[in-house]
Image: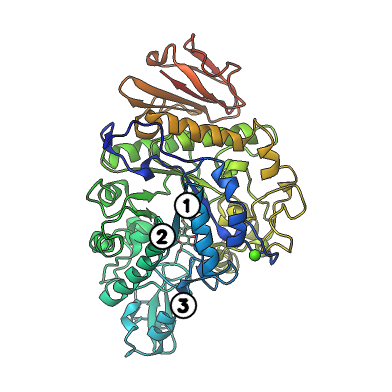
C-alpha cells in the first residue's frame, strides 16, 4: 500500500526540501469511464469507491480525480455549471464524502480538479453576466466590442479557440463578444475582477475545508490576459498556448490564491502547465517561494503534436532532450513531474510503445519503468496499469470529444482536409482513446457497467482487463506494483540527480539517478530490435534491481559482470551501484 518511503527522516534530501508529494506516485481517475455502479452506463463515485482497492494495491499514494462537479458535459466536466454540487450522474455529496473517507482510510490522498480559467455558459454567474451590460456580474467574464471587418463586425482579435474557430462569440443579447479559449460553451472568467477571484477562492476553500488534499488546477496559467488583447505574434500562431500562459498578472494571482485559499496549510497545488515554458515553470514552483508546488507539462507527451490536432514526426533524441531540458532549465529548487498519459492524450502503450500482440506487454512495462524512475513526481493514468490501448475509430460519428468534432466541422466540412487524412491523424492524437471505459474483466461490457456503456468499450477487453492482469505475476499491473515499491525503497529514484548517458542514441534511453555514490542506471531499449550497448564504467558490478519481461535472463540482484549488454527489443532494466 502506501506509506512513507524508506528515506531517512530529514528536512532536506540531496538538497531538496522533502514533501509528501515529491515522494508520492499519483493515479488519475477520469470518473465518467472508471466504473459504473448503478447500471446507467456512466461511471460514478460509488463505482470508484467499489474499485478503490484496485488502485490502492498498486501502491500509489494519491488519486487525482478529474472534475466531479455539476456540468452539461460539453467538455466532459471541464465546463462546470455548479462548483459546489456533485454531478447528479456521478452521485451525491454524501457519496463524495464517503469516497474521501475511503481514500484516506487506505492511506491515500485525494486531489480534486479545479477548472477556474472558465466556467460553463450555463453557470449562474454567466447567465447573469450575459443578461445585461449593467449586470453586477458583467465583468466576471471577458466582454469586448467587435472590430470592423469588410463584412461588418468581427471578433475583437485573432485569438483562436483550442477547439477550433475564433476564441470569441458575439452574444446577440447585448451585441458584445465574449472570450472562450475553449468551446463557446466555456466562457473565460475575468480574473481582473476582484469579486470574481474572491468567489473562486471561496469555492476552493469549500472543498479544502471538506478535507481534500489539494487541487489539480486546469489550464491555470491562462487566467491572466493582456488587457490590450493584441493579435497573436507570428512566432506563436502555431502554438498559441505559449501566448495564453504568459499573461502579465499570473504570478500575482497565483500568489493571492496561495494566501487566500491555502492559508498556510500543506494542501497541494498542482498546476496544469499547458503553454508554460520550463523557465516560467521554475519561477511558478520554486521551493518556498513559487505559488504552486508542481506543474504538469505536456512537452514530452505532445512531442508528436503539430498545430492543433495535427501530428508531426519526432525522434527519440527529440524526446530525451525534453527530459534533460526540463531538468537543466527549471532550476534545482523547482520540482518536476512526469506525465506521459492522461485523459487528453492517446493511450500510453499505443502512443510511445508497441501495441502489437508480441510487444504490448514488454513495451508497456518499459514505459512504466520510464515513468517511475524519471526525475519528478510520476502520474499514472487509469488503464495504463493494465496496458489498455487506443481504440479503432473509423468514422467521425464514433468520436465523443468536442475537440475532434469541432475540428471535423471546421476542417473537413470546411474543405481544408479530406476525411481519410483527418481520421488517420485523429486516430493518432485523439483524446477519446483515453476515454473508453476501464476494462475490468472479459465480459462483454468489460465489467464497466451492467447497462449500455456511454462510450465504446474496446473489444480487446476480452484479453486486456484488470482481472486477467491481476492474476498474472508477469503482467503490467504487477510490474507497476514492483516499480512503485522499488521507487519508494530507492532514494536516488526519488531525489537523485538526473543525467542522460546516451542523448543522441536513436533507440536507447539510458539515464542515471544519483545521490553521491548511490546511483541507479535505467536502461531502456525503446525499439523493436536488439540493441548492443556498453554500460558506463561507473556501473561495473552494479546489481540488477528491476528487469522487464523482454529483458535479461539474469536474476534480480545478480551483479552485472560484463559491461557489454545486448538489449532485447523493449528491454527495460534498472541497475543500482
Ligand atoms: O487537447 C488539448 C488542446 O489541444 C489539450 O492539450 C488540452 O486542451 C490542454 O492540455 C488543456 O487541458 C485541460 O483544459 C481543457 C480540457 O478540455 C482538458 O480536458 C483539460 O485537461 C479545457 O478545460
Ligand atoms: Ca452510473
Evaluate whether residue 75 shows in this view: no
Q: Which mark is residue 211?
A: 2
Coordinates of residue 324 in the picture (x, y in percent): 36, 35
Name the residue located 51 percent from the left edge and 69 percent from the top edge.
93
In primary-sequence order, the first of circles 2 and 1 is: 1
Q: Report the Cα–Cα distance between label 3 and label 2.
A: 29 Å
Evaluate if marks 2 and 1 touch, with contact meaning CB atoms under 8 Å apart. yes
Q: Which mark is residue 435?
A: none
Coordinates of residue 4 in the picture (x, y in percent): 41, 38
Observer-nearest residue: 532 or 381?
Answer: 381
In primary-sequence order, the first of circles 3 and 2 is: 3
Q: Report the Cα–Cα distance between label 1 and label 3.
A: 34 Å
Circle 3 or circle 2, nearest the eye? 2
Q: Report the Cα–Cα distance between label 2 and label 1.
A: 10 Å
Q: Measured along the vertical axis of the image, is residue 143 above or below residue 100?
A: below
Q: Which mark is residue 104?
A: 1
- Displayed quadrant of residue 395: bottom right
Name the residue located 67 percent from the left edge and 61 percent from the top edge.
398
Say whether residue 289 is left or right of residue 440: left
Task: Return the residue at label 3.
Answer: 121
Give the residue at the far top of this rendering: 561
Name the residue located 65 percent from the left edge and 60 percent from the top edge.
36
Observer-nearest residue: 551 or 61?
Answer: 61
Coordinates of residue 56 in the picture (x, y in percent): 54, 45
Give the residue at the far right of this rendering: 444
Q: Measured along the vertical axis of the image, is residue 109 above or below residue 260?
A: above
Coordinates of residue 185 in the picture (x, y in percent): 48, 74
Amino acid at each position: 500500500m502506501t506509506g512513507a518511503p524508506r528515506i531517512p527522516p530529514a528536512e532536506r534530501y540531496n538538497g531538496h526540501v522533502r514533501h509528501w508529494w515529491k515522494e508520492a506516485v499519483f493515479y488519475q481517475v477520469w470518473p465518467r469511464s472508471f466504473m459504473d455502479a448503478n447500471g446507467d452506463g456512466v461511471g460514478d463515485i460509488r463505482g470508484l469507491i467499489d474499485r478503490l482497492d484496485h488502485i490502492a494495491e498498486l501502491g500509489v499514494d494519491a488519486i487525482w480525480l478529474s472534475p466531479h462537479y455539476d456540468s452539461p458535459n460539453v467538455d466532459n466536466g471541464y465546463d462546470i455549471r455548479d462548483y459546489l454540487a456533485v454531478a447528479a450522474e456521478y452521485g451525491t455529496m454524501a457519496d463524495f464524502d464517503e469516497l474521501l473517507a475511503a481514500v484516506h482510510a487506505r492511506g491515500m490522498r485525494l486531489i480534486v480538479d479545479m477548472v477556474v480559467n472558465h466556467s460553463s455558459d450555463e453557470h449562474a454567474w454567466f447567465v447573469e453576466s450575459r443578461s445585461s451590460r449593467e449586470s453586477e456580474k458583467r465583468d466576471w467574464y471577458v466582454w469586448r466590442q467587435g472590430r470592423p471587418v469588410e463584412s461588418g463586425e468581427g471578433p475583437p482579435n485573432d485569438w483562436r479557440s483550442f477547439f477550433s474557430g475564433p476564441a470569441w462569440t458575439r452574444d446577440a443579447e447585448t451585441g458584445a463578444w465574449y472570450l472562450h479559449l475553449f468551446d463557446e460553451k466555456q466562457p473565460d472568467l475575468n480574473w481582473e475582477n476582484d469579486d470574481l477571484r474572491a468567489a473562486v477562492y471561496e469555492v476552493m476553500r469549500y472543498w479544502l475545508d471538506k478535507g481534500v488534499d489539494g487541487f489539480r488546477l486546469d489550464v491555470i496559467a491562462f487566467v491572466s490576459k493582456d488587457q490590450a488583447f493584441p493579435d497573436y505574434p507570428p512566432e506563436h500562431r502555431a502554438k498559441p498556448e505559449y501566448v495564453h500562459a504568459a499573461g502579465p498578472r499570473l504570478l500575482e494571482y497565483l500568489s493571492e490564491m496561495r494566501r487566500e485559499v491555502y492559508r498556510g496549510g500543506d494542501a497541494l497545488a498542482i498546476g496544469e502547465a499547458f503553454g508554460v515554458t520550463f523557465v516560467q515553470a521554475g519561477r511558478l514552483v520554486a521551493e518556498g517561494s513559487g505559488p504552486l508546488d508542481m506543474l504538469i507539462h505536456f512537452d514530452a507527451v505532445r512531442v508528436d503534436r503539430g498545430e492543433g490536432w495535427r501530428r508531426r514526426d519526432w525522434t527519440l533524441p527529440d524526446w530525451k532532450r525534453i527530459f534533460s531540458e526540463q531538468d537543466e532549465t527549471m532550476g534545482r529548487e523547482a520540482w518536476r513531474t512526469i506525465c506521459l498519459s492522461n485523459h487528453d492524450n492517446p493511450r500510453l502503450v499505443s502512443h510511445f510503445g508497441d501495441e502489437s500482440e508480441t510487444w504490448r506487454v514488454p513495451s508497456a512495462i518499459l514505459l512504466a519503468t520510464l515513468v517511475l524512475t524519471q526525475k519528478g513526481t510520476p502520474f499514472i493514468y487509469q488503464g495504463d496499469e493494465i496496458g489498455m490501448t487506443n481504440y479503432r475509430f473509423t468514422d467521425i460519428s464514433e468520436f465523443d470529444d468536442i475537440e475532434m468534432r469541432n475540428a471535423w466541422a471546421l476542417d473537413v466540412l470546411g474543405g481544408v482536409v479530406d476525411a481519410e487524412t483527418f481520421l488517420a491523424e485523429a486516430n493518432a492524437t485523439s483524446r477519446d482513446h483515453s476515454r473508453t471505459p476501464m476494462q475490468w474483466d472479459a465480459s462483454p461490457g468489460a465489467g464497466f457497467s451492467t447497462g449500455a456503456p456511454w462510450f465504446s468499450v474496446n473489444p480487446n477487453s476480452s484479453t486486456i482487463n484488470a482481472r486477467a492482469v491481476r492474476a498474472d505475476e508477469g503482467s503490467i499491473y504487477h510490474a507497476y506494483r514492483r516499480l512503485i515499491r522499488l521507487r519508494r525503497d530507492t532514494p536516488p529514484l526519488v531525489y537523485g540527480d538526473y543525467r542522460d548517458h546516451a542523448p543522441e542514441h536513436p533507440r536507447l534511453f539510458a539515464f542515471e539517478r544519483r545521490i553521491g555514490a548511490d546511483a541507479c542506471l535505467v536502461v531502456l531499449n525503446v525499439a523493436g530490435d536488439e540493441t548492443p550497448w556498453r554500460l558506463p564504467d561507473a556501473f561495473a558490478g552494479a546489481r540488477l534491481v528491476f528487469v522487464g519481461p523482454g529483458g535479461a535472463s539474469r536474476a534480480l540482484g545478480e551483479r552485472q559482470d560484463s559491461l557489454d549488454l545486448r538489449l532485447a527489443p523493449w528491454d527495460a532494466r534498472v541497475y543500482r551501484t
